[in-house]
Image (cartoon, rainbow, N blue to C red):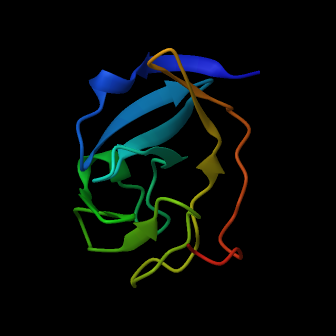
């Protein structure tokens, strides 16, 4: 069941915010096109909140050590991280953001 987490307007373009659903931290990211994605908020390299990092194109960069993750697939794109983060399905209904709290891993899919 999808969980309402915020309004679309609560997330600025090219930024991320942290939300927590059932003790699971999630980075909600709005890219430059205004599309919203949700990935695990914890860097797989160093237990750092990814939502405090930097959004560029379709990546979220960890502020501590510079690992970049795909906001589409969760794949770790640069070292030192090499393990992916989970992704979550996002649905926008009447300007509100809903997330399916069931994590999945899409890192083996081709990126668009």
Horizontally, residue 1 falls left or right of residue 77, namely right
- Residue at image coords 50%, 27%: 20
**Closest to the observer: 22 or 107?**
107
Image quadrant holding the C terminus, namely bottom right
Q: From where the camera sits, is residue 49 visible?
A: no
- Residue at image coords 38%, 45%: 29
Find residue 83 and report its horizontal and vertical position in percent. Answer: 58, 74
Q: From where the camera sits, is residue 84 visible?
A: yes
Find residue 104 and report its horizontal and vertical position in percent. Answer: 73, 52
- Residue at image coords 65%, 71%: 107
Q: Is residue 37 above or below residue 99?
A: below
Horizontally, residue 92 falls left or right of residue 63, namely right
Find residue 54 and report its horizontal and vertical position in percent. Answer: 23, 58
Question: Residue 65 occupies which quadrant of the picture?
Answer: bottom left
Find residue 59 and report its horizontal and vertical position in percent. Answer: 37, 66
- Residue at image coords 37%, 35%: 18
Q: Is residue 30 above or below residue 74?
A: above
Image quadrant holding the N terminus, namely top right
């Amino acid at each position: 069941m999808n969980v309402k987490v915020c309004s679309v307007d609560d997330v600025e373009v090219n930024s991320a915010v942290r939300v927590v659903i059932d003790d699971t931290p999630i980075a909600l990211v709005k890219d430059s096109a205004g599309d919203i994605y949700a990935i695990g908020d914890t860097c797989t390299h160093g237990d750092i909140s990814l939502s405090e990092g930097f959004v560029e194109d379709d990546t979220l960069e960890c502020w501590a050590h510079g690992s970049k993750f795909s906001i589409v697939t969760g794949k770790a794109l640069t070292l030192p991280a090499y393990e992916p983060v989970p992704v979550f399905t996002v649905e926008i209904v009447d300007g509100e953001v809903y997330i399916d709290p069931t994590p999945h891993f899409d890192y083996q899919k081709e990126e668009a």
